[in-house]
Amino acid sequence: MYKCWEKGLSGKALDLFQETFLQDSSIDWFAIEQKYDRVYETEHNIPDFVLSRIKPYL
């Protein structure tokens, strides 16, 4: 959600995210991104039909 917000995307879910989570200064967004910023080649549960469509963007 943070990356979507950072890219300037909008919508109801991002409005809620902004109101709820971005106001919390105790959240370390950099640490979260470092931990969850990749999709592993073999250790994931993404269905093949989804992975094949998103893989070029990863």
Image: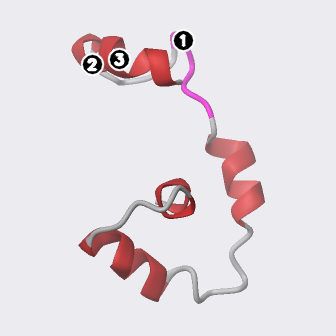
Q: Check the image and report above or below for 12 versus 20.
A: above
Residue located 33% across and 11% down the image: 52
Q: Is residue 47 above or below residue 33?
A: above
Q: Classify mark 3: helix, strand or loop.
A: helix
Residue 47's spot in the image, x, y percent?
27, 18
Query: Helix, strand or loop at disc 1?
Result: loop
Per the model, the C-alpha gap separating discs 1 and 3 is: 10 Å
Q: Residue beneath label 1, please?
A: 41
Q: Which marked residue is nearer to the observer: mark 3 or mark 2? A: 3
Is 7 left or right of 17, judged from the image as shown? right
Of the numbered discs in the image, which one, if any, rests on residue 47?
A: 2
Q: Residues within 10 Å of mark 3 (few under 14, many from 20)?
A: some
Magenta stretch: helix, strand or loop mostly: loop
Amino acid marked by disc 2: Pro
Read off the magenta span.
38-42
Gap in Å between the C-alphas at discs 3 and 2? 6 Å
Amino acid type, mark 3: Leu
Q: Earlier in the sequence, mark 1 or mark 3?
A: 1
Residue 7 painted magenta: no
The way the protein has been coloured in the rendering is secondary structure
Q: Nearer the viewer, residue 53 or 44?
A: 53
Measure the alpha-carbon separation of dots 2 and 1. Answer: 12 Å
Q: Is residue 12 above or below residue 25?
A: above
Ranked by sequence position, the earlier of labels 2 and 1 is 1
Label 1 vs label 3, nearer the camera: 3
Which disc number belongs to residue 52? none
List x then y, in percent, for residue 17: 42, 75
Residue drawn 57% across and 80% down?
Answer: 22
